[in-house]
Amino acid sequence: MDTESHSVRRTLIQPIFWHTIPLIFIIFMVLFFPFRYRFEFNPDEGINAIKAMMNTKGYQLYSEIWSDQPPIFTMLLTLCFRIFGLNIPAGRGLELLFSAATLWLAIQYLRQFWGNIHAVFGILTIMLLPYYLVLSVSIMIGLPAIALALLSFYALSLWHKFGDVKWLIVSAIAFGLSIMTKAFTAILGPIFLSGILLSGWKEYRQHRDWLKACMPSAVWLAIFSVTVGSILIIVVRPANVFQLIQGHLLAGDSVLFRAYADNRIAIFLSRFKYSIPMLLLAFLGGIAALRSRSWTAMYLVAWVAIGSISLFINVPFWHHQQLLVTVPAAILAAIAIGDGLSKLQKILQLREGNVLGIAMGIFVWSLAVTFSLYRLPSTVQQFDYKLPNLRAQPVEYSEDEEILALMAEYAHLTNWVYTDRPMFAFRTQLSVPPHLAVLSKKRIAAGVLTEDQILEILVEYEPEQVLSGRLNLPVIQEYLATRNYDRIDSSAHHRLNVLEDFLQIPTSPAGSSTQE
């Protein structure tokens, strides 16, 4: 009776343990990863934050706020800001939830289809991925899109295992939401649909019933189409759909990004140089899946292969985009490590003279150790074990702090601010001209936004503060030269100009900003 009771307790406790791992990850990141007081991890953080802030102020996405990205993340971020206030940690907390969801989905898939030991290594390989921890707390759209795509994959795998149509519906909805978060996951559509069609073909060969065989793919495609179509029609609006693709199509042919195209191979290899041992493990994981006839893992193999091709073709290819390939590759790597350990243990226990099996097991573990030793030091160094996130850090008088303080001094006199560093506008809660909320190199390089258009917008809105930091646009100097602005900062990389009239008015005694 005691043995049976112990077995029941263990059966109940084990699933709870696996489900709490993402929560432990969140707590550990909040306590030890210094993100709450970091000004900005990437300029895209400011762009995403300012779009959501302007949305909270009543400006409509696409019709007023120009954006070349799908709306789901901006909608969630807007909701987050309305609930928790306009502060950066709230947005980074939202991103952290998506990161924890990614870990949970990887764990569940590996446990369901491979085993607990594979799930353990899945956690480690994902957390050791280059840029994964930083992107887990950066207000950017790539990781949320990958998390939703992974949900689609996991639900599709459960459908293959149990045959319950509800998982097919969940998969289709999740995939639609993924594309409507960031469209680079669209490459998975043909992969997922092909897998469903192959399953239908297998069904047809057994029962010779075309209707039954085609039903799963028809259901998945219909639900996916309704999900994406509804968002495009209701949120984006048909008149604005071209806005989502225009800049991306034209950027690759621009003069600014021609260097990326000319050095495509070198840039591609440099992006993945820290992941080479893990990618080799992913290759071995694909072989292990093929030998084990684990067809759901073939989705991951195709995901890595086609994702790599799409990133190679894409211009420009930024460092944060590599997670599209490295996250599924990490799951395959965990399969290789777990499978190699299990087979090596079995060979040694049975004392078989399987030299090839032993050699392969040692090779797999050598790659795993190499990747760990290669990545572990830089991963550990990212944490601060003095708990900086439980209290405010001492403010160092950096250029960013200088600019922020100056902008905050004149915030009460400012209706509009022009800036190519929107994080400053967000932290001082100053509105930007909606059409210039997304002021990116890609948009300008593609010719979607011209300097003449920028000048027209500046003349229309007459911003009281003008901050340049990233883009050296002659039109800004042209605009300033024809009006009474004075530069008030002393930084080397920024130029903050305010109206001369401001200098005659007492500044705000608060001088506060929303750095929390």
Image: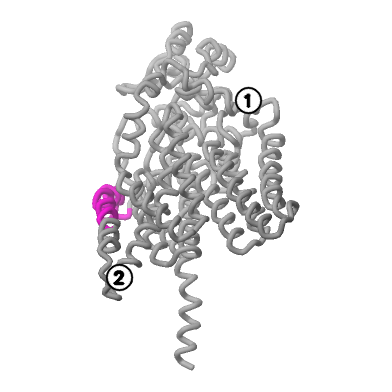
Residue 374: horizontal and vertical position, in percent?
A: 25, 49
Judging depth in this view, the residue of 266 and 257 nearest the camera is 266
Q: Quadrant of residue 204?
A: bottom right
**Residue 347: numbered disc:** 2
Q: Secondary structure at mark 1?
A: helix
Task: Report crowding for label 1: few under 14, some 14 to 19, many 20 or more residues within 10 A (C-alpha).
Answer: few
Q: Secondary structure at mark 2?
A: helix
Q: Amino acid at mark 2?
A: Ile
Judging depth in this view, the residue of 261 and 97 nearest the camera is 261
Residue 99: horizontal and vertical position, in percent?
A: 46, 51
- Residue 411 in view, yes or no: yes
Task: Report crowding for label 2: few under 14, some 14 to 19, many 20 or more residues within 10 A (C-alpha).
Answer: some
Q: Is residue 207 magenta?
A: no
What is the span of residues highlighted in magenta in the rendered image? 365-387
Q: Is residue 381 magenta?
A: yes
- Name the residue tied to disc 1: 242
Residue 256: horizontal and vertical position, in percent?
A: 41, 18
Q: Amino acid at mark 1?
A: Phe
Q: Quadrant of residue 187?
A: top right
Q: Is residue 342 left or right of residue 309?
A: left
